[in-house]
Amino acid sequence: MVDFEVVSLSEADHPEEGDTAPDFTRPLVNEEYWEDTSLSAVVAEGPTLLAFHPMDGAFPTTYIWNEYDDRGFTEDVQVVGLSISSPYEHKDLLAERAEGARLFSDPAGDVAEQYGIEHDLDGMTGVVEPRPAVFLLDDDRTIEYAWVASEWPAFPEYDEIEAAIDALV
């Protein structure tokens, strides 16, 4: 059994449903390669689930991506993750799970800060990662659904995500 304490997080000042998701450019990793790509270029391809997650290898990340895979979210929308992990670590995650997804690499945590969802890691001075968060975007980057963790660890409301995807597509 994993031994951890649930911790309440400070309130996040994040984009809400109806807002336009902030644009950014970061390395976007797939099974074969990575290249700098903007979020606006991704969402221009169609509805997109933008999933912020803890660093690769952390138990919440494994659980989150297993659930996305089991529910087949990539069959209905593009699914792109984002964490502080490097492209090399993302390649390993994609080899193990996150089938059909792509992953943005944001080692400095700048995108999490831009979205107002940065989380200082306990006991790791200067290390910031995004708290778990999900934004369902239409092809204009309008946020159709938003969920942001208010405690650590926390997991997205998967049934709500599924319903929002069904309503969008």
Image: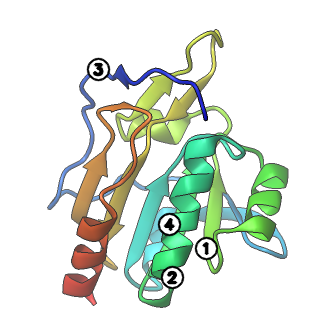
- Which mark, by number, is residue 10? 3
Q: Quadrant of residue 98?
A: bottom right
Residue under label 2, please give it: 74
**Residue 36 or 51: which is nearer the viewer?**
51
Q: How many marks?
A: 4
Residue 48 in the figure: left or right of residue 16: right
- What color scheme is it? rainbow
Q: CA distance from mark 1 to mark 3?
A: 30 Å
Disc 3 on helix, strand or loop?
loop
**Residue 45 or 158: which is nearer the viewer?**
158
Disc 2 on helix, strand or loop?
helix
Residue 132 in the figure: left or right of residue 85: left
Between tags 4 and 2, which lies in front? Answer: 4
* Disc 2: CA contacts within 10 A as few (<14), some (14-19) or many (>=20): some
Q: Amino acid at mark 3?
A: Ser
* Disc 4: CA contacts within 10 A as few (<14), some (14-19) or many (>=20): some
Residue 120 in the figure: left or right of residue 88: left
**Who comes first in sequence, dot 4 or dot 1?**
4
Q: Position of residue 160 (x, y in %)?
A: 23, 67
Residue under label 1, please give it: 101
- Which mark, by number, is residue 67? 4
* Disc 1: CA contacts within 10 A as few (<14), some (14-19) or many (>=20): many
* Disc 3: CA contacts within 10 A as few (<14), some (14-19) or many (>=20): few
Q: Are marks 2 and 3 in contact (CB under 8 Å)?
A: no
**Who comes first in sequence, dot 2 or dot 1?**
2
Q: Position of residue 37 (x, y in %)?
A: 62, 65
